[in-house]
Amino acid sequence: MTSPQNDPGEPHTAEDRAHRGEDLAALLERLLAQAPDRTQKDLAGAAGISYPTLNAWMNRTRGTSRVAPETLRALVDAFRHWGVGVTPKEMFEAAGRPVPGRADEEREGRLLALYRQLPESKQRDLIKFADAMLRDAAAAVQVSRVS
């Protein structure tokens, strides 16, 4: 079995696979139930987000497809700190987002250096292309949640 620290994007337990298809509200509700002494306000504070925002996600009155990756990772960290098992993959899929690849400073530096060498019109094209790639990846996550 792989440790979550070594491979944060992959499911690690049968429970991960059993809850595929749940949205962020359902996942957060299930995880909060596993921490009975914790509230939505506790979670919001631990994850560094506002309580009204978290509450809107849980009541499904605010969309979650644009939640920042850092926020989703902060939610995972908060639950793990409380002893509640959850993987980044579960959290990202519940929010309808693909799990971002690991940060690699060398690759990011190379990409930035290439971007800076492009004329402005090509920089805009590259951003549009990256946006389209991200939308395609998110659509693939949505399809896998439904399947």
Image (cartoon, grey):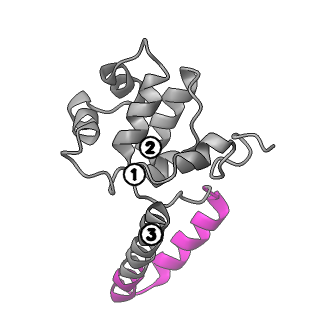
Q: Is residue 112 magenta?
A: yes
What residue is rendered at 74% in x and 45% in y? 6
Q: In x, y percent, where is residue 45?
A: 35, 23
For the magenta stretch, what is the residue range?
103-126
Q: Look at the numbered discs 1 and 3 and tell me whether their residues touch, using CB distance below 8 Å.
A: no
Residue receiving disc 1? 95
Q: Depth-wise, is mark 1 or mark 3 nearer the camera?
A: 3
**37 lies above or below 66:** above
Q: Quadrant of the N terminus?
A: top right
Tally the marks. 3
Front residue of 140/66: it is 140
What residue is rendered at 63% in x and 58% in y? 105
Front residue of 14/139: it is 14
What residue is rendered at 32% in x and 33% in y? 49
**144 lies above or below 47:** below
At label 1, which amino acid type do we have? Ala
Q: CA distance from mark 2 to mark 3?
A: 20 Å
Q: In x, y percent, where is residue 96?
A: 40, 58
Which secondary structure, mark 2? helix
Q: Look at the numbered discs 2 and 1 and tell me whether their residues touch, using CB distance below 8 Å.
A: yes
Residue receiving disc 3? 143
Which secondary structure, mark 3? helix
At label 3, which amino acid type do we have? Val
Badge 2: few (under 14), some or many (20 or more) residues near its Cα, within 10 Å? many
Q: Depth-wise, is mark 2 or mark 3 nearer the camera?
A: 3
Residue receiving disc 2? 72
Task: Return the disc, 2 or 3, that comes first in the chain's sequence.
Answer: 2
Relative to 133, 111 lies left or right: right
Which secondary structure, mark 1? loop
Q: In x, y percent, where is residue 120?
A: 34, 84
